[in-house]
């Protein structure tokens, strides 16, 4: 439920932009900074709140984060002017990464080790389902009753999430193993940074295509405006199924699954360049691109494995990395379009970003092998 609320406000804000830009009396490019303010809140809030929360009960932290998220969206719905809207969207973004990170840790703690990735996927499922149900709902409310209702409904869902956590989340004790300092120590581990870099770069390809998908459908495919939500829904279905299927493989072979997803994304993003010229082929390709969205869940589990004593911060930073990808992909795609290569060039740019992520994966994999060899050699010497 919390993931659904977060996913709805993150993606629906883009579709509500024409409405709140008119309501706040600013042009659309200026209003677009509201989206950037939310992303900045995610990047800042994920590590900051994760460190602050390290000495408190995870159950209480989740309730507090959802109440802060509800407040930010309620204030967004009531924003009297553009500067206030910018500030409220920044506040709304602050709990995003920390919530997903800590919720993933709680979910993983409730199941056997061989099902941890599936448990994390269930938390992330709300984010993908939001692209199918929540975004159209918020957009419909925005058109029928006014854009403020699109943010108001998210505030209501977030409040309901906080109540649900109080009712069903397990009671736990604060971690007494070092608190904030223990969390920050993980930043000295190069494996953490390599894992974050895989997501920050490799996931950018998906966002590169998604950002310009509507424009490509209309200008290249020749589809009607009414067909755009249909294809966006197909993308959401692909992401949701990817989040169901991929974790089953990841729980058996985590790093090979990550490599397979990056390679899969590189191939289907390259096919997008050709597929964009017909509706049936672009719809199938967009579905396939969505399947690659399971990478986020896989990397979340890897970070939890690597960050002993600082799992909350590591899991939260994963969402900062993906918001970096959300900025990198559209920026790189925009450069290709501005250079005259056309809207379909986003497929090639996305392919290159996925391959770059795969290259970083290779470095991380070699580092794992080197570390394992060192440990085995040390164990042999001691024996």
Image: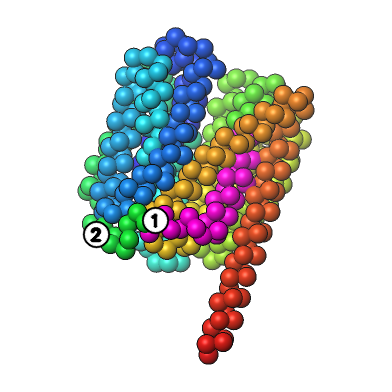
In this rendered view, identify the residue nearer to me: 84 or 62.
84
Res 223 label: none
In the rendered picture of this protein, how many numbered marks are placed on residues?
Answer: 2
Q: Is residue 282 magenta?
A: no
Q: Residue at x 56, y 81 (%)?
A: 378
Q: Residue at x 34, y 18 (%)?
A: 79
Q: Is residue 193 magenta?
A: yes
Residue 364, relative to residue 339: is it above or below?
A: below
In this rendered view, identify the residue nearer to me: 40 or 233.
40
Q: Secondary structure of the magenta portion, mostly?
A: helix
Helix, strand or loop under label 1: helix
Residue 207, given in percent of the width and then of the height, sits at 59, 36
**The image quarter in which residue 8 lies:** top left
Residue 77, given in percent of the width and then of the height, sits at 34, 21
The residue that mark 1 highlights is 183
**The image quarter in which residue 365 lies:** bottom right
Q: Label 1 crowding class (10 Å Cα cut-off): few <14, some 14-19, many 20+?
A: many
Q: Residue at x 66, y 21 (%)?
A: 218
Magenta extent: 182-210
Tag nearer the camera, 1 or 2:
1
In this rendered view, identify the residue nearer to me: 144 or 71.
71
Residue 136 is at least partly visible in this image:
no
**Quarter that holds the N terminus:** top left
The residue that mark 2 highlights is 173
Residue 293 is at least partly visible in this image:
yes
Residue 22, given in percent of the width and then of the height, sits at 46, 11
Q: Residue at x 31, y 33 (%)?
A: 70
User: Quick check: 225 left or right of 148?
Assistant: right
Q: Residue furthest bottom?
A: 383
């Amino acid at each position: 439920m919390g993931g659904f609320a977060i996913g709805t406000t993150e993606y629906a804000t883009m579709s509500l932009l024409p409405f709140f830009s008119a309501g706040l009396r600013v042009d659309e490019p200026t209003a677009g900074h509201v989206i950037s303010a939310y992303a900045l809140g995610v990047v800042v809030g994920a590590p900051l709140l994760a460190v602050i929360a390290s000495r408190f009960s995870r159950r209480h932290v989740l309730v507090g984060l959802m109440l802060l998220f509800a407040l930010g969206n309620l204030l967004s719905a009531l924003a009297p002017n553009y500067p206030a809207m910018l500030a409220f969207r920044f506040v709304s973004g602050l709990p995003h990464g920390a919530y997903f990170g800590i919720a993933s840790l709680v979910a993983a703690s409730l199941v056997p080790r061989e099902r941890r990735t599936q448990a994390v996927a269930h938390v992330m499922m709300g984010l993908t389902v939001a692209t199918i149900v929540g975004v159209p709902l918020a957009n419909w409310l925005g058109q029928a009753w006014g854009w403020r209702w699109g943010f108001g409904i998210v505030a209501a869902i977030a409040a309901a999430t906080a109540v649900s956590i109080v009712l069903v989340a397990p009671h736990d004790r604060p971690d007494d193993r070092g608190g904030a300092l223990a969390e920050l120590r993980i930043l000295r581990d190069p494996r953490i940074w390599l894992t974050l870099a895989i997501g920050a770069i490799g996931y950018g390809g998906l966002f590169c295509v998604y950002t310009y998908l509507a424009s490509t459908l209309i200008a290249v495919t020749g589809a009607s405006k009414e067909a755009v939500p249909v294809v966006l829904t197909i993308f959401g279905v692909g992401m949701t199924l990817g989040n169901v299927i991929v974790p089953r493989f990841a729980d058996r072979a985590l790093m090979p699954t990550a490599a397979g997803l990056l390679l899969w994304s590189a191939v289907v993003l390259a096919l997008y360049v050709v597929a964009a010229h017909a509706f049936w082929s672009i719809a199938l390709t967009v579905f396939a691109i969505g399947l690659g969205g399971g990478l986020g869940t896989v990397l979340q589990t890897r970070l939890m494995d690597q960050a002993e004593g600082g799992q909350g911060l590591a899991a939260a930073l994963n969402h900062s990395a993906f918001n970096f990808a959300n900025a990198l992909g559209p920026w790189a795609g925009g450069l290709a379009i501005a250079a005259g290569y056309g809207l379909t060039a986003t497929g090639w740019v996305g392919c290159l970003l996925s391959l770059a992520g795969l290259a970083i994966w290779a470095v991380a994999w070699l580092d794992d092998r080197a570390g394992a060899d060192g440990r085995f050699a040390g164990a042999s010497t001691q024996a």
